[in-house]
Amino acid sequence: MLFALGLQLMSKSVNSASAVGRITKEDALTYRDGLIIALLAAVPLRRRTLAALTIDQHLVKIGTHWLLDIPAADTKTCRALEFPVPHALFECIDLYLADFRGAISGANTHQGLWPSAKGHPMDGGAIYDAVRRRTTEALGFPVNLHRFRGAAGNLWSISDPRNVRGVKDLLGHTDFGTTERHYIGAQSRLAGHALARVLRFHGTR
């Protein structure tokens, strides 16, 4: 759902720019926010790490493929991280860097991946506010940055519980204890749904 929302926002920006023959400031900001949301849905980074991303150091292109190469200095746990970017975002990133990012005032004066309209990179608070605003407008409720991480942990736990320890690396946790909370929570919800089905069955007999 969140990944699709990000794609929808970027598509909306492209269509709007095509309609008027140029990229407006609003088009550029909407595209930026859509890319943030889609990337977060696929690679659930912490706020600090997301805000620290730069186009000259962290975002790496190998052939037609994009990946995030994040040094230990830019992570909470002081562990280097590397994430492949989903194929569906390759062209989105290409278009963002070629056209939409530069349409944001001051973007060409710094290397921050997420330029603000104030001439400098967005900080964690600005990204937090932008994502909450876009998700509220689209979904009717705000989605906090941390909920992307929780959703990723829960989805993995439900979809592939046998390999749930992989969530530790996805979320950049230093030990499985933190990850285990996602696993327990997800399994508890599954058990709760199973119990509810049993109760409904007996209640209709």
Image (cartoon, rainbow, N blue to C red):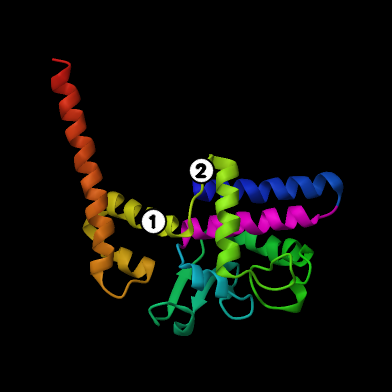
Mark sitting on residue 21:
none
Alpha carbon distance from label 2 to label 1 = 19 Å
Q: Regarding mark 1 in the picture, which secondary structure is present there?
A: helix
Is residue 61 found left or right of 145 in the rendered image? Answer: right
Mark 2: secondary structure: loop
Looking at the picture, which amino acid does disc 1 mark?
Answer: Ala
Q: Position of residue 30 (x, y in %)?
A: 68, 53
Nearest to viewer (mark 2 / mark 1) = 2
Residue at image position (25%, 52%) is: 185
Binning the other alpha carbons within 10 Å of mark 1 as few (below 14), some (14 to 19) or many (20 upward) gives some
Q: Quadrant of residue 44?
A: bottom left
Residue at the extreme top: 205
Position of 197 relative to 83 (above/below)? above
Q: Which mark is residue 141?
A: 2
Of callouts 2 and 1, the N-terminal one? 2
* Residue depicted at 17% across the width and 22% down the height: 201
Dominant secondary structure of the residues highlighted in magenta in the image? helix
Three-letter code for the amino acid on which mark 2 is drawn: Phe
Determine which residue is flagged by label 1.
152
Q: Which residues are magenta?
A: 22-43
At a point 86% along the width and 50% down the height, the residue shown is 21
| Disc 2 packing (10 Å; few <14; some 14–19; many ≥20) | few
